[in-house]
Image (spheres, rainbow, N blue to C red):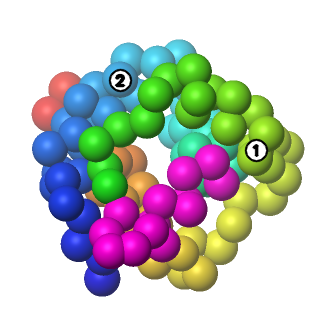
Amino acid sequence: MFWMDTDPDLVLPDAAVTCAASPYSLPELRAIYWNEVFPAVRFNMWWLPAPEWRGFELDWLAERILKRNRFGRRLPYGWLHRYSQAWWQRLETAIVEIREGR
């Protein structure tokens, strides 16, 4: 398990609200997470001494997503990326709850 210097739990609710308000379906959001965001920022998981979750500059992030994307490809197997899969599952649950009005 990786411990971040900033708790990702603090940003999960806002991320879920943003995703829930988007026009994208849950399968589309899953593809965005795995094929756009994950390839662009997964390097952050391996920084030493510890990765950071304080955010990325938006222009830099957009450029990196366009360079590192996996648009149109099969989604990677979540079990190969357990930590990222666990966060996707939490985000997905929150999105569904918001969209269902819970």
Q: Position of residue 19 (x, y in %)?
A: 41, 28
Instruction: Write the residue at 31% across / 70% down.
Output: 50
Locate residue 55: give its quadrant: top left
Circle 1 sits on which residue? 69
Q: In the image, what residue type sits under mark 1?
A: Asn
In the rendered structure, find residue 18 and report the number of the disc placed on it: 2
Please give the label number shown on residue 93. none
Residue 89 at x, y percent in the picture = 38, 59
Q: Which sits earlier in the primary sequence, circle 2 or circle 1?
A: 2
Mark in front: 2 vs 1: 1
Residue name at image x 35 percent, y 23 percent: 18
Q: Residue furthest front?
A: 49
Is residue 35 or residue 26 the one in the foreground? 35
Horizontally, is 35 left or right of 60 in the view? right
Does 50 appear in magenta? yes
Q: Nearer the viewer, residue 94 or 83?
A: 83
> Which secondary structure type mostly characterizes the magenta part of the structure?
helix
Q: Helix, strand or loop at disc 1?
A: loop
